[in-house]
Image (tube, rainbow, N blue to C red):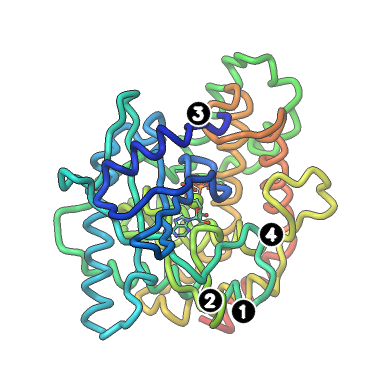
Amino acid sequence: MERAKHSKDVLRHVVSGFQVWGDFTDAVPYGSGHINDTYKVSVRLAGTPVHYLLQRINHEIFKQPDRVMENIVRVTEHLRGKLAAGGEAEASRKALTVIPARDGLPYVRDPAGNWWRLYLFIEGAQTYDVIETERQAYEAARAFARFQNQLADLPAPRLHETIPAFHNTLSRVKALEAAAAADVCGRKAGAAAELAFVEERREQCGRLLARNACGEIPERITHNDTKINNVMLDDAAGEGICVIDLDTVMPGLALYDFGDMVRSATASAQEDERDLSKVGSRINMFGALARGYLSEATFLLPAEVEELCFAGRLITLTIGIRFLTDFLAGDVYFKTHRPGQNLDRCRTQFQMVRSMESQAGAMEAIVREVG
Ligand code: ADP
Ligand code: GN1
Ligand code: MG
């Protein structure tokens, strides 16, 4: 999907629907997320510059945005309660703050049928698409583990499943096969090697699902999109201060969260790098992630710890499958900015899988040593 554009007037009007005081001055596209339309909004509050983060929720992907927001309000309020109980002085930088609309709802609808939400903009911190230092990997993993820890006692009811079967690799393989059979854009012939790559790894795809179904690996409340640019690292102290992008916080496996950190934080190049000789999984970053994650994820069972390395390969394969499916379907899900980008993304993911496969023994040894 191409990045949608909204005029300043539309954005100004949307912002006026939220409980924001002061004078709107600007709104500019922000970040490199693949799903929502994100804007950094500038306001002058009686002369003081203040920023907000405005997002149009992608309602083609999240079919019930009100349920997404219900989850997010519950989760952020729970986190805020924990931060307050711990005497945290900077709670509004350590959990997202949802700004209510003037009518009290956590979103604003526009005449075109869109759903918008507004957060406080977290200042003095950044996200990274490619991790630069082991310290960043360690801190990011610690922040995601802390997030899982803080949500372990979220009161009932169960969170809504905002995208059903999100990390179900078997369903993702079926969707790939359907897209290849339909071949609506005539792209299948150009992806023969990638389709064969998936076929060769087919029997691994149900492993965690089976261990979950027989009760060996439990369901927990997880983030489900622990891509490394979904955690903000403090500019001054370097700490992972705030986990963001909460659309998919729902019941899931902790292993998928760790796996997606491995996929995104150990990568040596951008997700859409075309020169595959630059793409690989950096084992030093894997070590930093394992140390950071296990320092806080004290709830993990031995059955989960023993699958940490495998989960990295599995999630990377799964997300490669999703990019390939979208390429075959005509680029209808992930935002693209050039032709062939989803196939390039699929290729980097599969290159990462190869790289992790070749380093599996060394990665297992790291987990044994840290765990
Ligand atoms: P998407 O679902 O499209 O990935 P995200 O929620 O991850 O959207 O937001 C996109 C980017 O915007 C993030 O990677 C981050 O850089 C930035 N961002 C998101 N929320 C905030 C916030 N509250 N404060 C500052 N930056 C933010
Ligand atoms: C999307 O929203 P973003 O860009 O953080 C996607 C993830 C993929 C990721 C791949 C809701 O994440 O599942 O792993 O792209 N989010 C959704 O980069 O599908
Ligand atoms: Mg994101």
Viewer-nearest residue: 75 or 208:
75
Q: Which residue is mark 4?
A: 267
What amino acid is at disc 4?
A: Ala
Q: Secondary structure at mark 4?
A: loop
If you read the primary sequence from the N terminus, does the residue marked by circle 1 or circle 4 appear first?
A: 1
Q: Count neighbours of disc 3 (C-alpha within 10 A) and say few if under 14, some if 14 to 19, many if 20 or more.
A: some
Give me the residue at 47% from left, 67% from top.
123
Q: Are marks 2 and 3 in contact (CB under 8 Å)?
A: no
On the image, which quarter does residue 283 sit in?
A: bottom right
Q: Nearer the viewer, residue 165 or 93?
A: 93
Q: Is residue 150 visible?
A: yes
Residue occupied by mark 2: 139
Snapshot quadrant of residue 135: bottom right
Ranked by sequence position, the earlier of labels 4 and 2 is 2
User: Spatial distance from mark 2 to mark 1, Cα to Cα?
Assistant: 6 Å
Q: Residue at x 42, y 68 (%)?
A: 242
Whichever of callouts 2 and 3 sits on the residue coming sooner in the sequence is 2
- The location of residue 78, given as percent across then percent down, is 22, 66
- Circles 2 and 1, Cβ within 8 Å, touching? The answer is yes
Residue type at mark 2: give it: Glu
